[in-house]
Amino acid sequence: MSEPVVVMEHVSKHYRQGSTDVPALRDVSLTIERGEFTALCGPSGSGKTTALNLIGALDKPTSGSIKVEGHDLGSLGRGALSELRRDRIGFVFQAYNLVPVLTAYENAEIVLALQGAAPGARRSTVMKVLGDVGLGGMEARRPDAMSGGQQQRVAIARAVAAHPAIILADEPTANVDSETAEKLLELMEKLNRQEGATFLFSTHDPRVMARARRLLKMVDGQIVEDQRKS
Amino acid sequence: MLRGPALYKMAWRNLWRNRRRTIITLSSLAFGVLTAVSFTALTDQSLGDAIDLAARMSNGHVTIEQKDYRDSPSLERTVTGDAAMRARIAADRDVVKVVPRISGQLVVATATDSFGAGFVALDPTLDDERSFAPLGQISEGKLFAAGDAQGIVLGKTLAKNLGAALGKKVVYTLTDKHGEIVSGLGRVRGIVATGSPSADAALCLLPIGAVRSLIGYGPDEATQLAVYLRDQRRAAEVAQRLGALVPPGTVALGWAQVNPDLAGFVTVKVIGSEVIEIFVILLIAAGIFNTLFVSVMERLREFGILLAIGFSPGRLFRLVLWESLWLALVGLVVGVIVTAPLYHYMHVHGIDMTARVGTNRVEIAGALMPMVVHATIYTDHAIVIAIAIVAVTMLSGLYPAWRAARVQPVDAIKLGY
């Protein structure tokens, strides 16, 4: 396990609030390797989500460089960033964020469809992934007919279906009950172990931290502790 | 291979996420279709009727006459409408009938009185009420028969002023082809009541054969050849074509050149109707824009997510445009469904404005317009309305679509809704 998926070097991110400069991330350097199951943890405002947004090519750093599978995000245009997100990065959001007018099947299929995968291959992949996340038989349901936990499973299925280099999960258990949270974490852990999917969480949920094999503790926009579990 | 989820399907489903808002927007679109079709159909039919009637009150949709006749009308300025010439004109795909006419001024007198009048000399075997409206408005007696050299039909008011009842003798005086004064004897065979005060006071119909003999014309000579068309809207085009067929010194004029007053009236009515339709369409466009814009602004977070998972800005732009297109197409269908019964009623029964106007016909620029107005829309006008509705809806969707494509994913995802 030595192939780097994400390399951040001296990354800072500052926001402007009126005339005030607010540092959200300060000189962060970090490497995430393939197959990791890592959690960024820390109090609110510590920079976890900012780090995830930068790695996910949703935002640009004020300084420093970020590489995803060797692609320097700073050198890519809007279209190339869009393709990188589509092909190499999976997202799981706190509020599920499924497309409300699409069924569970269509939501899980959407990234594969955007990639132009053949319909047959799409179908077999999506059916397998939905089965893996425990939603077999619920393909035709729309988000408004599913529980929060089920919606988050669809979101996970959407994120892993296209076999991205890394899955960025921002507080994935924040909106579900404890039992559902445990099941979701088990599911993601299983996908990590069996499929080799690389996960990077942003969380302050102790359950996530307990399962993570690497813990990056953030305070005031800096990584203050990098703890690897055996 | 087309990449990505079917945008048309997503757009269709998005359309129904807020049913009430969509239904309100569809209602405004349907109202636009109804207004545009009704206005246009009433205008098309009433102006078409007026133009046809004017053509049937004078010398056709296209009039063939000597080049200088319009500036200086005279019985000396003639055209030759022999059978071969008429056949060549009648061979045009838009022409339904060609008839020779002689028209001019005369003085008609009885033993007690005399009046100046306009006359139209026609061939009763060629003309009927479809080519010359007054022939369908003979209120007493009938049209002179073929070979009746003395027959004459007078306008109702003219006959009354002359004291000329059916069967009475009248003498009419006019100048011949060479400028000499000649007189003919006529016997009143019919009285015509057109409803037009000017026509009823000064209309005199004569047999063309007798007039030709009297004024020294050849057997096929006439002042005009009146040409009738299937569709009056093609008059200018047909006039241009027929102009190439007629001998030098002869011209073919469309009805608008012959009757510029009516052409002006038609233009004013059409422009008025178009201005109203443009205002209606602008109001509808504002409503559609509002719907699409609010719909986009409500979904900024969703668009941010779509961008995050790999939608391109262009794809988002197309998604919103698809929503506009669906709105336009469904609005059009609803509009047609809502409009059809009203259109059918107005087409069959018309709108009776007699009570409001106080008469059943009004003379405008020489044409008698009936006060029961029917609605018939020309096919090309209906197509233009459909295209305009779709185009306006799509244009209204351009800015919301652009706004959706400009979403910055990180900013949109931060939004709390």
Image: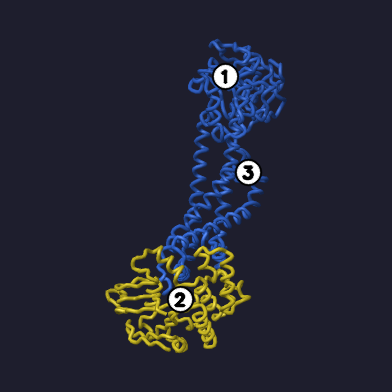
Q: Amino acid at mark 1?
A: Thr
Circle 2 Cα neighbour tier, 10 Å, few/some/many (<14 / 14–19 / ≥20): many
Kindly tell me whether residue A11 is visible in this rendering: no
- Image side of residue B140 versus residue A162, left or right: right
Nearest to viewer (mark 1 / mark 2): 2
- View extreme (front): residue: A2
Between A80 and A227, which is closer to the camera in this rendering?
A227
Nearest to viewer (mark 2 / mark 3): 2
Counting from the top left corner in percent of width and height, residue B174 is at 58, 15
Which residue is identified by label 1? B223
Counting from the top left corner in percent of width and height, residue B327 is at 55, 59
Chain drawn blue in the picture: B
Kindly tell me whether residue B302 is visible in this rendering: yes
Q: Amino acid at mark 2?
A: Ile
Q: Chain of mark 2?
A: A
Instruction: Give the Cα distance between marks 2 and 3.
Output: 68 Å
Question: Color of chain A here?
Answer: yellow
Which residue is identified by label 3? B374
